[in-house]
Amino acid sequence: MAKNAISKTTTTTKAVAQIVKFDDMKGWGFEGLEQEDYATPRLKVLMALSPEITDETVPGAKPGMIYNSVTQELYDGTKGILVLPCGFAREYVEWSNLGTGTNAPVNVYPATSDILSQTTRDNMNKDRLENGNYIETCANHFLYVVNEGGQSSNGMLGDPALITLKSTAYKKSKKFNSLIRSVIPNNWPMFSGLFRVTTTKQKNDKGSWHSFDFSFERLLDQTEERDVDLFNAASSFALTVKKGEAKVSREEGDATKTDEATPF
């Protein structure tokens, strides 16, 4: 460079990020949403022929795992998940034969309905109506799934969920209800006890499959801060269930072909 040459200097300007306080806009965009506008996540046992496995839509999915239909989370079926039961609802769902309808329920009847008295049991062990449709007895267990690692990414101690047991798996529902009733003190609410939900492999002469299993862990401790927080969180969901605001959503193809007790 010549002695008297002027060197060119480059000035770099750094952009300063504007600090935004997200808390100042808390709730924006959610104003029009009510409880009934949210889907209660379903928990189901994955089978060898579950679409999440055969279609490879859920990475890491294996038979016997527990799958969350909304968050797409997978849980080890052997370790299981810790839950607080928050409510129960039995209902009767009317289906048309697979391949003849829309894969959506024809009708849903409450537990007080006498619809079963209008059916006849066929050789496939289905309760048939005169119109050819069949009735499926469904047991809906509303649960608060505890995050055993502490708080989840959304700051919650857990999340609401639903397990539906039907067909031959309905027996597991009765056992779960009996277990809850036997360990929860009479003057305490259902969600004052922690239970473990796991999966077990079963088999018969038609094949093998996985199904839910339930066991009692312990009662909540009224002197422990985390237990009290769990109790309050579960009671909030239980109130939603009691009001009938925790709607049971049904996906297409939610008929018996995906039942937990069907061998695969």
Image (cartoon, rainbow, N blue to C red):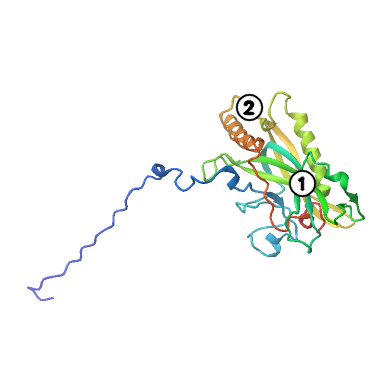
> What numbered label is drawn on residue 221?
2
Q: Amino acid at mark 1?
A: Leu
Q: Nearer the viewer, residue 29 or 229?
A: 29
Is residue 197 left or right of 7 when viewed as pictured?
right
Name the spot of residue 189 as percent of width and height, x first: 68, 29
Q: Residue furthest left?
A: 4
Question: Which residue is label 1 attached to?
Answer: 165
Badge nearest the viewer, 2 or 1? 1
Is residue 41 left or right of 156 when viewed as pictured?
right
Which secondary structure lies at badge 2?
A: loop
Instruction: Give the answer, above or below, for where 80 lies relative to 233.
Output: below
Looking at marks 2 and 1 on the same chain, the residue that comes earlier in the sequence is marked by: 1
Is residue 72 left or right of 104 when viewed as pictured?
left
- Quarter occupied by the N terminus: bottom left
Name the spot of residue 153 as percent of width and height, x first: 52, 46
- Graded by Cα atoms within 10 Å as few (under 14), some (14 to 19) or many (20 or more), the crowding at tag 1 reads many
Q: Amino acid at mark 2?
A: Asp
